[in-house]
Image: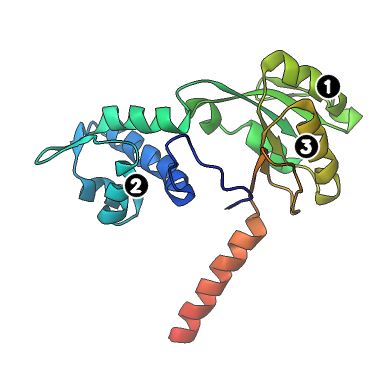
Amino acid sequence: MTARSSSETARDIPEATVARLPVYLRALTSLSEEGIRTCSSEELAGAAGVNSAKLRKDLSYLGSYGTRGVGYDVDYLRYQIAREIGVTQDWPVVIVGIGNLGHALANYSGFRSRGFRVVALLDADETRHGEEVAGVEVRAFEDLEEIVTTHGVAIGVIATPAASSHDVADRMVACGITSILNFAPSVLSVPNGVDVRKVDLSIELQILAYHEQRKANAV
């Protein structure tokens, strides 16, 4: 997963650290669900899959939340990271393109539990209009502007074919969406002030294939 822009938070947290904060949040959530109330930096680093020195440096950008000899209060640190990321509030999200991938994204239960609420599903295919997916009605793409205005949507997800993604992105930007998650196999050109994160599943698989090939050649 790659980011087009390098915008940083008000605290000037490095982009690489920002990318790891959700990983720490997920690890802390798992620890909390296991009934663990405090953890050391080594334990949290192990749960997150990073080294402890990197974790301590990352968390230092947020403030001093650890206690020497005790470690971190799991629930308190989880809240602080969630607040820093911005997922302590409810973010309305619109998904455009309700094919197989868009359908799967709409049904993903992790959105709501992590601070995101899918308020609209849009598709250009008229035969899909009126269909209900995960309790949300599929509507026409032409309704995008009304939906963005009504719900205050700032985040849009593109799950369309590559050929349609550029027009969809342009329309999103024109309607006021300032953050885009792009699953289409395409590189989008957007104005300054608009953030795009690209998820290319085929590239991720090719990277895994590279590592598998190296392991096979090492035998």
User: In the rendered view of the protein, which quadrant contains the C terminus?
Assistant: bottom left
Amino acid type for the residue under numbered disc 3: Gly
Measuring from the top left, give residue 88's x and y in whole percent: 45, 23
**Residue 176 sits above or below residue 31 on the image:** above
Q: Earlier in the sequence, mark 3 or mark 1?
A: 3
Disc 2/disc 3 C-alpha distance (Å): 36 Å
Q: Where is residue 133 shown, x and y percent of the image?
A: 70, 26
**Alpha-carbon span between mark 3 and mark 1:** 13 Å
> Which residue of the protein is positioned furthest toward the right in this rendering?
126
Q: Nearer the viewer, residue 118 or 148?
A: 148
* Label 3 crowd bin: few (<14), some (14–19), many (20+), radius 10 Å: many
Tag shown at residue 97: 3
Give the label on residue 143, or none.
Answer: 1
Residue at image point 35% right, 34% down: 29
Q: Earlier in the sequence, mark 1 or mark 2?
A: 2
- Element at label 3: loop
Q: Residue at x 51, y 73 (%)?
A: 212
Which residue matches tag 2?
58
- Seen from the viewer's position, the closer of residues 169 and 131 is 169
Look at 82% across and 33% down and name the residue there.
171
Q: Nearer the viewer, mark 2 or mark 3?
A: 2
Q: Is residue 88 above or below residue 101?
A: above
Q: Amino acid at mark 1?
A: Asp
Horizontally, residue 81 falls left or right of residue 182, namely: left
- Disc 2 residue type (three-letter): Asp
The label nearer to you, 1 versus 2, is: 2
Q: Which mark is residue 28?
A: none
Q: Earlier in the sequence, mark 2 or mark 3?
A: 2
Mark 3 vs mark 1: in front: 1
The answer to whether 7 appears left or right of 51 in the picture is right
**Inter-mark Cα distance, 1 to 2:** 41 Å
